[in-house]
Each structure stands twice: as structure tokens, then as C-alpha cells.
Amino acid sequence: MSAPIGLIDFQITPPAPGWYGVVCLAGGARTLRKAVYWTGREWKQHPVFPWFRSAFGFETADAAQAWLDALPD
């Protein structure tokens, strides 16, 4: 399931290691946008109640975070 702003369902494992932007439920009605590094092992340990991740990886955490910051509210 893809969203129109370049997000993919979090449950679809990323194709390659890298930094990904993740949008998740942080509690109540709040959402959290976080840059997460994936190598193949850690992915299931990151944010609680994830919804979506970026469709592609980034080279740095800052690049992933900048992408997240540019998403509409």
C-alpha cells in the first residue's frame, strides 16, 4: 500500500540498508516522525506502532529527517 507522498506501508521491508523516514503513532493522537537506520536486523525494534516509512533510503539521518520535516502535517 503506497501513499501519494512517497510513503510505503511500514510492514514492507526496505530493499536495502540505509536511513529511512518513519511515521508512527507516538501516543494518543500524536504522531512521531523519526529517521531510522535499517541493516536487516533492527527494523522491527523501531518506533512503536509504525504506520509508514519512506519509499527509499537516505545516506544520512539528517537527509531522512529533512525529508520527514518536509511532509505535510
Image: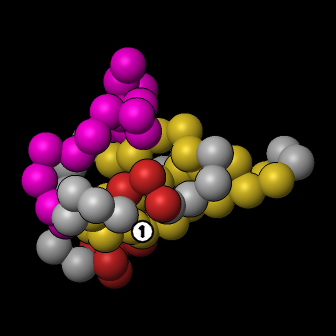
Start and end of the magenta stretch? 1-18
Judged from this view, the residue extending furthest toward the right is: 28
Residue 36 percent across, percent down from the top left:
39, 67
Q: Is residue 4 visible?
A: no
Q: Is residue 61 above or below residue 18?
A: below
Left/right placement of residue 26 relative to residue 46 reads right
Q: Residues within 10 Å of mark 1 (few under 14, many from 20)?
A: many
Residue under circle 1?
35
- The secondary structure making up most of the magenta span is loop
Q: Please identify the quarter of the rendering in which residue 64 is found.
A: bottom left
Q: 61 or 69, which is in the foreground? A: 61
Judged from this view, the residue extending furthest toward the top is: 1
Q: Residue at x 55, y 38 (%)?
A: 51
Quarter containing the N terminus: top left
Residue 41: say if magenta: no
Please say which color scheme the image uses: secondary structure
Q: Is residue 63 visible?
A: yes
Q: Is residue 72 above or below residue 46?
A: above
Q: 60 or 49, which is in the foreground? A: 49
Three-letter amino acid code at the position of disc 1:
Ala
Residue 23 percent across, percent down from the top left:
54, 50
Residue 4 percent across, percent down from the top left:
38, 26
Q: Residue at x 42, y 68 (%)?
A: 35
Q: Residue at x 84, y 45 (%)?
A: 29
Residue 65 percent across, percent down from the top left:
41, 71
Q: 36 or 67, which is in the foreground? A: 36
Q: Is residue 65 above or below residue 41?
A: below
